[in-house]
Image: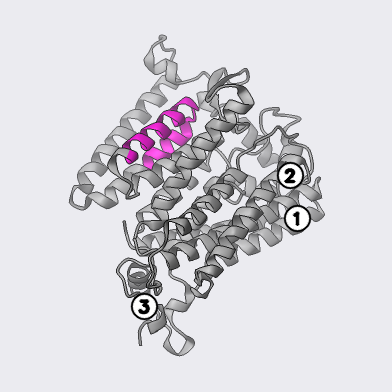
Amino acid sequence: MGIPMRYRSPRTGVGGCAIPADRYSSTSRLIPLSSLTLVIIAFIPMGKADPLSGGLSTHRLLEIGLLLLGTGIIVVHAAGRQALDVPFEKRAFALLSLFTLWAALSALWSPNSMLSVAKACELWLTAVAALFTASVLRRSFASRTALIHTLALVFVVTLGVLVLANTAIHGSPFSFMYEEFSGRTRLYLAYEHPLGIGDLSALAMICIFDSDLRKVIKVVSFSAFSIILILTDSRAALAAVAAALFSMLLMRSKGKGLLILAAITSGVLIAGFLYSDSLRQERPRGSLDASIREDADTLNGRTDLWRYAWELIQERPFCGYGYYSTRFYTLREFPWAGAMHNAYIETQFTLGLPGSVLFLLFTAYVASVARRTRCRFLVGTALYCYIESFINPLLFTPGVPMFILLVSLMNAAPPVEWIGSSADRIRGGRRFGRLARDYSMPPH
């Protein structure tokens, strides 16, 4: 009984895999850093694109090209480090593969078949990149926080690339644009929407908060991304990252957890009361009113969009309208809405009942792994993505949030092979949980 010897770690904190005797050279460290940076940048628009164009536009070909390049480097590097011999986490990848298969099949009834197939392939490549990233870091590093440390550096490098790109595109490191439909002035980097920059900044804050970077670098980089998040005026992202960071802090505080939880709960209740009360009555212009827009009760018009989506969903509840087809039905009624601004409604609208079932299965698996492994990074990332997805469709769409969620999940979950063969199968949640804590990324 027990874990096969070849999967036992000779060093503390390694994801259940034998580590090569030689140190990981500084040159070799640059390879995963550069490849992951390419993957992250692949999801950030560097050019203008027609939202109604097909999947073979120049902008989308650049996305897929960078994603293929970054993923290819990761795979080759994994082969060179003999990381391909490491047991892979198959459950999450299998669920993502089924989802992308159904998304590709939806091209048969999608108004733009090429776009549905291209985005389905891009989502699958995102899962592949996450799979090999977790494998490489599990095989090559002895540090418990290697994954988070590497991703934190990737976000810092990505920010530098975006600032340089913004200088070349807009003539300034940081550019602000006024949105007529929302009445807000927001920070833009390259051609990415402020919501996308807000998501990137929030996930960077989660990585940096849980990383083992030097304190000076940690404080400076965390503060920089916090300022960028505020300048994008992504209020839902700000609330979601606050919830994620507080949850991670609770997991770290141990004995002080109940006191912090009580303080957080009280703050949320007070803020909720002030918010609901301000919506019900006429209020004088002041600091509270300045932070609450006139369309706050409709979530910037999202509730009208969701009612419109529900009417369409009732017409095609099983098959949906095709992956990434939302824009072809919403832009004529809501010129600002290229998506449903809600991942749960988006999935049902585009992929129908089968897509929603796969969504729920994946969510259940994420919750199971988070509960059993108690990995802070996974908990923080998952909380952010699932909370923010009530406002913006982050889940099951190729992008930075989905990639980071998959990497954290595949790194935290114990691979199937570690649970034993058919003759030596380990049953029971407690045993599974102990395996996850001992042989995967432990709580950090």
Range of residues picked out in magenta:
217-244
Which disc is residue 8 wearing? 3
Tell me the distance, in whole angstroms, between the alpha carbons under discs 1 and 3: 43 Å
Q: Tell me the SS state at disc 2.
A: loop
- Few, some or many C-alpha atoms within 10 Å of disc 3 (few <14, some 14-19, many ≥20)? some
Q: Is residue 187 above or below residue 13?
A: above
Name the residue located 60 percent from the left edge and 21 percent from the top edge: 171
Compare residues 116 and 340 and report the one nearer the observer: 116
- Asked if labels 2 and 1 touch by Cβ distance under 8 angstroms, the answer is yes
- Asked if labels 3 and 1 touch by Cβ distance under 8 angstroms, the answer is no
The kind of residue on which mark 1 rests is Ser
The kind of residue on which mark 3 rests is Arg
The kind of residue on which mark 2 rests is Ser
Marked residue nearer the N-terminal end (1 or 3): 3
Looking at the image, residue 49 sits to the left or right of residue 130; the answer is right
| Circle 1 residue | 106
Which disc is residue 325 wearing? 2
Q: Is residue 296 above or below residue 312?
A: above
Name the residue located 39 percent from the left edge and 22 percent from the top edge: 277
Looking at the image, residue 370 sits to the left or right of residue 168; the answer is left
- Residue 411 location, x and y as percent? 45, 62
Compare residues 230 and 364 and report the one nearer the observer: 230
- Few, some or many C-alpha atoms within 10 Å of disc 1 (few <14, some 14-19, many ≥20)? many
Looking at the image, residue 2 sits to the left or right of residue 166; the answer is left
Name the residue located 80 percent from the left edge and 50 percent from the top edge: 113
Q: Tell me if residue 322 can be seen.
A: no
Magenta stretch containing residue 424, yes or no?
no
Q: Tell me the SS state at disc 3.
A: loop
Overall secondary structure of the magenta stretch? helix
Marked residue nearer the N-terminal end (3 or 2): 3
